[in-house]
Image (cartoon, rainbow, N blue to C red):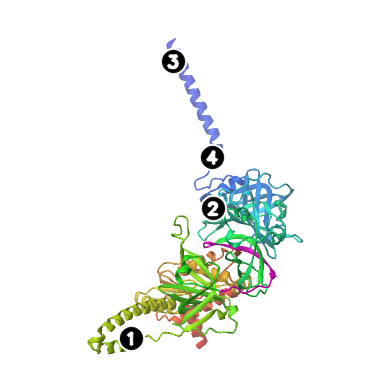
Amino acid sequence: MRTGKTLSLSFRFCCAALAILLALVTLRPAIAEQAPAKGQAVAQPTITTARQAHALLAIEANRGYPVHLQGVVTYFDPDYGVGYAAVFLCDSTGCVFFRPPSKSIPPLPAGTMVDVQGVSAAGDFGSIVVNPTVRILGNGPLPANPPQVTLSRLLTGTDDAQWVEVEGTVHSADVYPHSVTIHVALIDGVISGTMPIEAGANYAALIDAKVRVRGNAAPTVNADSQLIGVHLKVPGLSTVTVIEPAPANPFLRPPTPVDRLLHWDHYSDSFHRVHLRGNVTLQWPGQSLCLRDVTGGICMQTNQNLPFAPGDQVDAVGFVGTENNEPMLTGAELIHAGPGSPVAAVPITLDQALKGTFHSQLVQIDGRLIGEDDASSNVNLMLSSGNTIFSVLLPKKLLGSQTGPWKIGSLLRVTGICSVQIDIATHLREGVTVTKAFRVLMRTPGDVVVLEGPSWWTPGHILILLAIALGATLCVLAWVVVLRRRVEAQTVLLRQSEERFRHLALHDALTGLATRLLLDDRLNAALESAKRHQTGLALLMVDLDRFKLINDTYGHQAGDEVLRVTADRLTRAVRLSDTVARLGGDEFVVLLIDLHDQQKAEQIAAKIVQSMTEPIFFEGHSIPISVSVGVCSSSVGGLDAEALLKCADDALYKAKDSGRGCYSVFGLEEQLAVTGSMAR
């Protein structure tokens, strides 16, 4: 019986083993079909919600995940300047930006329901959808009940690309050919909102109104894709709700005394325009105007170009802000209130000017002329008083055909508006600002009076007097000692002036970059080093595109800011050992030394072109810029500075002929070959 039972168990075990073997043989083809072959890519998951698409990290987004979304378009710009359309799409989970080529996309007004298929990519700040195909499904409502956010929250990047709502007061509305930008003062700052222009709309009626604006949060980034600002993409006036219309004509309200602005008992009016009345003390047409009432002076920004005479009574309305340590008006509107008497200038000393109590007031101060910045868009005189140097400014268009008969070393008496600058690093002392420097804003060339010509004291004259003093008798020894002390003091002043002149000669006063003189010196040294070490070098000629249009559109102060920001971006784009110089106007040169790979110059040129595509914000304006770059690089012997400059200049013109906003390479070997061919 035991033997039979053992045989039965063995038979059952064998049957089970055979069944398992048959199952494996049967399932092996199916397993082989499902498992990926060696080297075969695993299928990527399809992203189906806007939240998932926007939440991808940069390294994930660049893997190009397939994206399939359905939602409503909240903002559409058919061409925002780079050959692509800008579109925000929202579904029930959130919003995401997608970027189709502008020539392949149909009009997608806000409220259009679409089906989008594309791939993920890393955008300037968050992940986006690229290469999309768009199918229109119909129309639908925009997202309801968006979160109401502050500027501080938006600057964290938390709500990037999302449909949000802000509430504040409209300070200005800039109308362009195809779009309108409104600037809304929130409780914690000012944010801009851009929307397509609508025919017949009265955007001026929004100014000073309390509004609720809905739109997509869009980032402003630098060349390193770092968030430095934020603005809104608004579909149109349909998402701008007026909560409180603008107050009645502010010109009819009682004027506010200048010295009461931003005081606690007037601070409730800071979100709306205020009304001021005073006598004109300075006018730079189309730029700024200063006036004074019985309590103090104030300056304001205005685009109006009304012909006011000094002393005229003017009514001004605008929004109160601060410049340095004093109130100012932005977006000011002006009307003539009647004739008046010119305001008398107050004579002040250097110490009084540095105390800041005469800010925005018409003053008179003496100083010795030590230099003039010819590269500035304004007449810019540098005066010294004691150990302090201050600037005296006048727009060149107000100089007219006159030329200033001012000689270096002359003692001048200057009349103008005192504008102080606070020490940002240490500006708090028991809550009170500390003045660091000041400048004087002139009204006409007649505001400068020469009190005394250049000093007779020169090093040669001083040596003669010293020789005579050494031969004098003992009775005048005391006088020699006194004179020597005066000589030492004069020598220190001359040395300081010489250092200042040397710096002005080698560095551009506006941008701080090297001048042509310093560039030539460094270029010659770089050529010698390249010959000695058998390395290469390159010259990049950089020119701002349509810079004259920027000056004409936004003013010369905006042009100066564009030049300063351009200089800063150029300096950050190159190595510390390289040289960035300003030749004058809007033309810059970059010297790249110790190049072992000539393609490095092209990489830097591309980096420069890319960094300049970011618009520059100045006084509430977004100024678009671009540059053209000419690249000349060479590693051949017998390099010549003029040849390099000529080669880079030719490459620059080639870049401009190619449509601007790009770079062009013209190797020195190519230049030499062309020159040799022309000689034959």
Secondary structure of the residue carrying numbered label 2:
loop
Secondary structure of the residue carrying numbered label 1:
helix
Residue bearing mark 2: 62
- Residue 409 placed where, x, y %? 44, 82
Chain-order first, disc 4 or disc 3: 3
- Residue 604 placed where, x, y %? 48, 67
Q: Quadrant of residue 124?
A: bottom right
In the image, is 183 to the left or to the right of 646?
right
Q: Label 2 to label 4, Cα distance in Å?
A: 31 Å
Q: Quadrant of the N terminus?
A: top left
Kind of residue sitting beneath label 1? Ile
Residue farthest to the top, as pictured: 1
What label does residue 462 carry, if any?
1
Chain-order first, disc 2 or disc 1: 2
Kind of residue sitting beneath label 3? Thr
Residue bearing mark 3: 6
Kind of residue sitting beneath label 2? Asn
Q: As rendered, which of 653 and 332 lies closer to the eye?
A: 332
Q: Label 4 to label 3, Cα distance in Å?
A: 39 Å
Residue 183 vertical position relative to residue 416 in the rendered view, above or below: above
What label does residue 32 carry, if any?
4
Q: Magenta span covers which residues?
A: 323-344
Q: As rendered, which of 313 and 505 lies closer to the eye?
A: 313
Residue 550 vertical position relative to residue 31 in the rendered view, above or below: below
